[in-house]
Image (cartoon, rainbow, N blue to C red):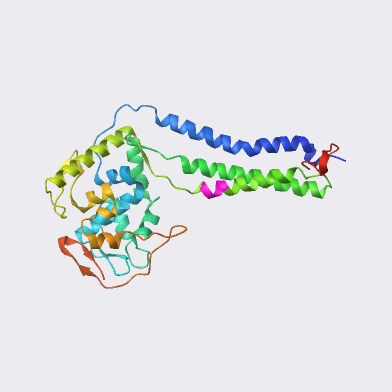
Amino acid sequence: MEDTWGIPGPAFLAIYGALLVFPLVVGLLWTIAAKLGAKIPRATVSEPEPTVYELAYLAGGPDRVVDTAIAALVDRGTLRVSSSKQLQLTGPLPADPIEKAVAKGARPGYNSTTRGIRDRLRMSGPMQALAKGLEERGLVVADRSPRIRQVVFFLYLAVLVLGVVRLIAGISGDRPVGFLIPLLIAAVFATLIARAVKNKRSGPRPTSEGGRILHRARSVHGRERKRGIPNGPGYAGAAGGALLGGAAAAVAFGGLAYYPDEELSAALIPPPVPGGFGGGSSGGGSTCSTGGGSSCSSGGGSSCGGGGCGG
């Protein structure tokens, strides 16, 4: 009787065991290489200094950028918050690419809650352009982890499929397959774990230079606030070209909890959603204005002992 696929059972078990380890090794080596590559010193960081949205990306990634743009547009009265926490566009589309994308997300027919707009803009064109610009200037290290985890998942999926096909072929050929089953179980668990972490997002990793610039801007912003610099929409303090005043800067450095209007801050912060991400409630609702310009609303011939081998 010929071996399944011309490969004896014991030999296939050894090969399959090695294949179970292969995706993990690939992931580890790729991760190490990415980290070592990120440590290669860059020549110089080019001008100009970061904008408020670039600082927001350094501080908290794409979601913080969206929050900062929402804060700026609400502060200027371009957006309002309905009683159902939906953002509503009340003025013309702004020129800034990030602000324009956020404002478009607040049109009727969209899930225009803070969470909904975050979800749509994380991988949008303007956000990718912003991240690429920071990476090219040496302020941010590209996060390769999602791509690495995705490759590891598909490798484990391929190993699992191979094992299942071998099992079926072994059974069809009346070959012993008992020792293959534990390895298949291990492959199932490995694939499930890889799938669970495949889409896990991690925040951006500022370089040492990016961290230094962010720390400096935070320090200047803190000093200006202590000196009583107003947070109104009309103020734009400049230090190194970065916007250091207004609601946008406060949110860029600290998040929506630092929006200067407590009522609007509470309305803009998305509630926690157990077990995953999701949209907000439906649109509608009346609106009410608050001060400061912001607005809100209410197998083979070989054999194995013990009953089977690898088909």
Q: Is residue 108 in the magenta section?
A: no
Residue 228 relative to residue 78: left or right:
left
Residue drawn at x 53%, y 32% is 29
Q: In the visual, does 277 lie left or right of 113?
A: right
Q: Is residue 47 above or below residue 246?
A: above
Residue occupying the point 32% across, 64% down: 107
| Residue 214 placement (x, y as % from top left) | 27, 39
Q: Quadrant of residue 120?
A: bottom left
Q: Residue at the location (64% across, 39% down)?
A: 20
Quadrant of the snapshot with the N terminus: top right
Q: Residue furthest front?
A: 306
On the picture, is 127 further left or further right than 311? left
The quadrant holding residue 73 is: bottom left
Q: Position of residue 27 (x, y in %)?
A: 54, 37
Report the quarter where the C terminus lies: top right
In front: 125, or 217? 217
Image vertical order of residue 161 relative to residue 13, above or below: below
Would you say the magenta stretch is mainly helix, strand or loop?
helix
Number of dots carrying numbers? 0
Residue 92 visible in the displayed image: no
Question: Considering only vertical position in the picture, is 303 above or below 36?
Answer: below
User: Looking at the image, which residue sits at the far right?
Assistant: 1
Q: Which quarter of the picture shows residue 90?
A: bottom left
Residue 202 place in picture, x, y as percent: 42, 45
Q: Is residue 108 visible?
A: yes
Q: Position of residue 124 (x, y in %)?
A: 38, 51
Magenta-colored span: 193-197
Residue at point 39% right, 27% down?
40
